[in-house]
Amino acid sequence: MSELTNSEKEVAELILESLNLEDVTVSDIDPDAALFNEGLGLDSIDALELAMAITQKYGFQLKSDDSNNARIFSSLRNLTNHIEAQRQN
């Protein structure tokens, strides 16, 4: 497992807080591992809650019909990279 960047730690904390994942810590999350199914075990409801939390914290909206959602939400690293790219716009 690779080391988390500060941005990845921030997004990991948002995931844990917004989804009330009490039995997982930031250090448990591999930045390249899947967030859904076999990874953290998140589901579509978790994706909606996480998208709302991202909107509230970072001020941009993740659209449910975006064809890139599978890639964006595939891992902590991809999600963090997407958030950073949106923050720069």
Image: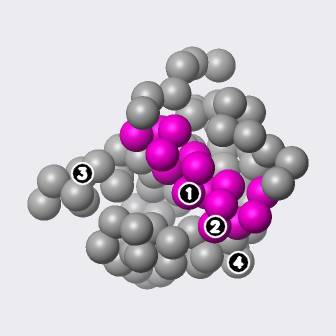
Marks 2, 3: nearer the viewer: 2
Q: Earlier in the sequence, mark 2 or mark 3?
A: 2
Q: Which residue is mark 4?
A: 45
Q: Quadrant of residue 16?
A: bottom right
Instruction: Establish if 63 lies above or below 40.
Output: below
Q: Which residue is mark 1?
A: 14
Q: What range of the chain is rendered magenta? A: 7-21
Question: Label 3 near label 4: C-beta < 8 Å?
Answer: no
Q: Is label 3 in a helix, a strand or a loop?
A: helix
x, y percentage for residue 9? 52, 39
Amino acid type, residue under disc 1 in the picture: Leu
Q: Main secondary structure of the magenta part?
A: helix
Q: Which residue is mark 3?
A: 85
Q: Earlier in the sequence, mark 1 or mark 3?
A: 1
Amino acid type, residue under disc 3 in the picture: Ala
x, y percentage for residue 13? 58, 50
Q: Which residue is mark 2?
A: 18
